[in-house]
Image (spheres, rainbow, N blue to C red):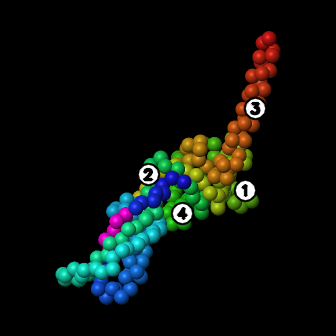
Amino acid sequence: MEGLKVSEADLLVYLHPSKSKNVSQAIYNELSSMLFKYNETFDGVLLAYSASTNDELAKILPGLHPCFGVRLKAQLLLFDPKPNMILEGKVVKLGAQSIHIVVLGFSSATIIDEDIREEFDYKVKHGKELFASSVNKRHKIEIETVVRFVVKSFDEETLHLSGSLLQPNTGNVNWLDKYAEEDLVERLIPRNKETIKRRIIAK
């Protein structure tokens, strides 16, 4: 899936002198407070990190709010989706007008009806809502389906995505990975047979 990146960073974390007895825990608390939030400095949403420091001593900086700085070397896993990137997420709700998806367990995405390609028809079967392809009956999108979609926009403040299923390489991930190639072959074989038949008649 696109939108994920690993970044190496040199950080300077400022801590209150009262936390000098357990610097490791203080650093952990400081970095953990940044998780699942968009950070302009990192240019993405921080999903995970690993950090180490070689500082044995840190100088307390004077001022109205005294603190001391600790230098870190950190490896950051960031989520930074851009328009036209391909993402995957699980469908949590759908209706005739939209499909609602959760990406990586924290970011919500919405695909409205005008961004769902025409081959998908909204249906209710046995009390369950779903979108079924008119091109291939096995290609369905329903609750719990993992969907591959294209990013249209990303709101950095709310972490909300707007997506699209207009592209042919989007839809039910399970179907795309297992049956898309098989379906293409099935659709091509009859055409090839017809072409051979026409050539024989022509001769």
Label 2 SS: loop
Q: Secondary structure at mark 3?
A: helix
Magenta span of residues: 9-13
Which residue is the site of mark 3? 189
| Upstream in sequence: badge 1 or badge 4 | 4
- In the rendered structure, which amino acid carries the disc numbered 4? Leu
Residue 104, which numbered label? 4
Residue 56 appears anywhere in the view: yes
Residue in front for this viewpoint, 76 or 64 = 76
Q: Is residue 29 above or below residue 3?
A: below
Residue 36, picture quadrant: bottom left
- Real-space Cα separation, disc 2 to disc 4, in angstroms: 16 Å
- Mark 2: which amino acid? Lys
Distance (Cα) linking label 2 and label 1: 35 Å
Dot 1, how many residues are within 10 Å of its Cα: few (below 14), some (14-19), or many (20+)? few
Residue 56 in which image quadrant: bottom left
Q: Which dot, 2 or 1, sits closer to the camera?
A: 2
> In the rendered structure, which disc, 2 or 4, sits on the residue that comes first in sequence?
2
Q: With 35 as the anchor, is 69 left or right in this view?
A: left
Residue at figure coordinates x 81%, y 16% from the top left: 200
Asked if the magenta segment contains residue 60, the reply would be no
Q: Measure how far apart labels 1 and 3 are at the Cα level.
A: 32 Å
Where residue 81 sits in the image (x, y, percent)?
45, 55
- Residue closest to the eye, 80 or 97: 80
Question: Where is residue 97 drawn, in percent x and y?
Answer: 56, 53
Q: Can residue 132 be seen in this snapshot? A: no
* Residue matched to label 1: 125
Mark 4 neighbour density, 10 Å: few (under 14) some (14–19) many (20 or more) = few
